[in-house]
Image (cartoon, rainbow, N blue to C red):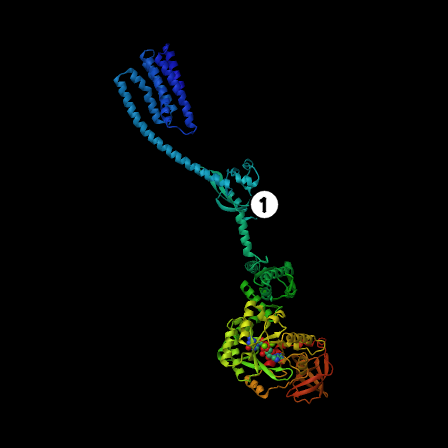
Amino acid sequence: MALAVAITSILAMLTSLSLPSLLAVAATLIGTTAAYFGGKLARFERSGEPIPKMFGVIAWGTLLVPVVAVGVIIADFALSDKIAWSLGCAGLVCNVTFSASLLSGRVPQQFSAAVAGWLPVAFMVGSLSSLGALGLGAVVALLIGRYQHRLQVERRRKDQARERVRNRAEDILRDYEETGHGWFWETDRRGQLTYISKSVSKALGRSTEELLQCPFTELFDLGRDEEEGERTLAFHLSSRSSFVELGVKANVQGEQRWWSISGRPAYDNFGNFLGFRGSGSDLTEKKRNQESVKRLAQFDSLTGLANRLQMQQTLEKILNAPNELRRECSVFLLDLDRFKQVNDTLGHPAGDALLKFVSQRLERVVGKDGRVGRLGGDEFKVIIPGHTERERLAQIAHEIIHSLSQPYTIDGQRVMIGASVGVAIAPYDGTTSESIIRNADLALYAAKDGGRGRYHFYSNELHSAVEERSKLERDLRDAIGDGGLELHYQPVVTSDSSEIAGFEALLRWKHPQQGWLSPAKFIPIAEDTGLISTIGEWAIRTVCNDLASWPEHIRCAVNVSALQFANPQLPTVITNAIAAAGIQPSRLELEITESVFLNDDAGTEAMFVALKRIGVRLALDDFGTGYSSLGYLKKAPFDKIKIDQSFVRGATQPGNRNGAIISSITNLADSLDMETTAEGVETLDELDLVRNLGCSHVQGYIYSKPVPLAQANLLVQQGPTIEAKGPRSAREARSKMLRKVVLEHGGEFYNATIRNMSPGGAMIEGLYNVPPGTTFNIAISASLVVRATSIWSRDERMGVEFAERLDTKATNLTDFQLVSQDNDRDQRLSA
Ligand code: C2E
Ligand code: MG
Ligand code: MG
């Protein structure tokens, strides 16, 4: 504006070819000076520094003074007729227009400048009309200016608000980028990066400028194109479709880093594709967490083996394979024998260590043949995919059992466990995972039932065994309700004087269809189903009542299962039974097996204390067959040790070491002030032996089998002694068979059947009343004829003794063995 003032003054002088008046000179000087400071103030205003209050007034002054100065200069020249009014007006219009353009956007200032330009002219001319026009113009300008000012203020407020929002959004995005939680990217239509956050270039170890030269896809590791995320990304970019939270692997050297990226295509107003725009975030931590969760969900945390879920998935994958031939597989279910015992006695850390050893051995045996998993506790599973011959499966099962049965050293202690294995083969034993597992479980159950440390293949008969067992369970419940159970009593005899010291009560059940059943067959069912507590309570009450009818010196023992022993109610049950029968507590003896020591120590000890407080006697049954730690003998207050019949059996055979064991047990019992009962004495030789070895009491068929109450009463009445009756020595083990043979005697041939046979003789059926001493040639097989003499005969049966002992192995006679020795024992029992 200073220039405008100066130019106006110079042009007026040039066109009038005259010098300006003093007033014009003063106006020129004041106008240019004010314009100069106005410029300075405008720059200060633009710098954004805080503006003092006075600033507005001074700014208005510096704005209006130069325009007034121009008006004064023009009016002065025109009034002194140095220039024409038309030229003066043109100059004034030019100046007002110039100042209006300088003040663009500031409407009040523009109006004020226009009025200020005309103000000196109107005053200097002095006519009323010009003053009136000026006044009117000023009022109109004031009103419009005010209105415009308001509009302007409003617009500025809106602009500032919009600016603030934009700044805030930018700040937030910048903060977001800087924290490293996320980043932004943009590409052009060719997929070339046009924007990328600094955090990405930092992560990739490259400069942002360098990255902006690259295609977007170069940010990711697309090397392994099987990766789901990368394939999907390529698809979206080429099809120009949006994608959300796509997991991709970052192209970072020497580190596994994962990103999640989202993006969408951008278009201009005409629908032309501009490129992609989107965001990304770091997925590494989440992915790692997911992986560890996945690992936890699929692997057993203790052993690192696959867990139940993963084994199930593996099996289902095989069984549902598209190719039918690939659906074959074999499943082994494993259960550790005596694991609970280790866990309970050595503690859980030792149990855990043992499980780790077991899993290592299992993996070593199974190797690449299959997959090993832990289902929980001491249960393991092995899946062997594909077709495997039964012989090979049997070999693997055998190796597993053998390997797991080798001793372990845990915390310096030697630990022995065993394993049982059940095997089911798909698709023969089932086509679904449920049926295969159920059948492998049945096979495992059969393996355990068969004596543990064994393997068993699934077969259809196992189902009938299970059904038979559940029928037996139902029948047992009925028997308990209907009084179908009985107690039989077997005498316990003093070895020095053969007096009946007491009895052992043994459970008997006459099954409506199967006849007399051994307790060995139904006690485990009673224990599994919890019926044992009812049965046990009934047995204790019955024994106490029967004791009441016998003389004071007769005692009676009752067997107490480990489950009963763990029941805190047992002392109450016993106290009540003794009180109800009115007998001396010391006449009742509880027979407990070593398995009670597998339970919690504190509970076991408390139970011993409670029972001793009642005053009953305690006997340790089947000593030597179970846990067999001598430690508890010192702690537990036993009155008697019962030496298991397996030690008595064969003790009389030359070279057998059972005698030495019996002798050491009696010595131990003596030193602990305990009695000993030798169980299962059947022959006179065995009786002599156990007497000589120092057993204080004897129990066995040599005196009597377990007999019903009435017969036991008779034995008591006939007492006090009882006579030992039986063979001198044990008969040789016989194999049962149904073998057709031909006997020759005096040139005559007879057809007969061998029912049982030992290397020394046989029982033959088919010839009536043969006189003892008759000799025969017996054609046992096409190549084997033996000479034999009859030694007894009853009806159509006779016993023969061979002239020479048979070598059963060489003659392959074991092939004819049909019935196991266990069954033999069952039959003897029912007889
Ligand atoms: P246990 O307590 O060791 O009983 C001795 C077993 O040996 C009895 O078998 C008896 O009949 C048998 N026995 C006795 N003398 C001889 C012999 O000279 N030769 C042979 N071969 N065997 C002989 P049983 O009656 O079959 O009982 C088997 C097991 O069932 C018992 O073994 C006992 O553990 C259990 N049991 C029997 N009754 C009960 C009961 O009321 N409650 C509980 N919880 N278990 C019982
Ligand atoms: Mg017993
Ligand atoms: Mg026993």
Can you give x and y, in whole percent of width and height, for residue 560 in the image?
Answer: 55, 75
Q: Using the rendered image of the protein, determine whether residue 342 is visible from the camera's viewpoint.
A: yes
Mark 1 near ligand 1 (CB under 8 Å)? no
Height in image: 240 above or below 457? Answer: above
As drawn, the residue found furthest toward the right would be 804
Q: Quadrant of residue 23?
A: top left
Can you give x and y, in whole percent of width and height, for residue 588 in the image?
Answer: 55, 79
Nearer the observer, 225 or 78: 78
Can you give x and y, in whole percent of width and height, for residue 30 in the image?
Answer: 37, 17
Nearer the observer, 751 or 547: 547
Q: Is residue 661 left or right of residue 230?
A: right
Count up the numbered dots: 1
Query: Ligand 2 shows up in which quadrant of the image?
Result: bottom right
Amino acid carrying mark 1 in the image: Glu
Can you give x and y, in whole percent of width and height, for residue 41 in the image?
Answer: 41, 24
Residue displayed at 34% across by 31% down? 151
Nearer the observer, 563 or 371: 563
Q: Quadrant of residue 359?
A: bottom right
Q: Using the rendered image of the protein, determine whether residue 485 is visible from the camera's viewpoint.
A: no
According to the image, label 1 marks what residue? 255
Task: Classify the position of the N terminus by image quarter.
Answer: top left
Nearer the observer, 796 or 147: 147
Q: Is residue 665 left or right of residue 115?
A: right
Q: Secondary structure at mark 1?
A: loop
Height in image: 183 above or below 327? Answer: above
Task: Classify the position of the C terminus by image quarter.
Answer: bottom right
As drawn, the residue found furthest toward the left would be 128
Q: Quadrant of residue 587?
A: bottom right
Crowding near the residue tagged with mark 1, few <14, some 14–19, many ≥20 C-alpha atoms within 10 Å: few
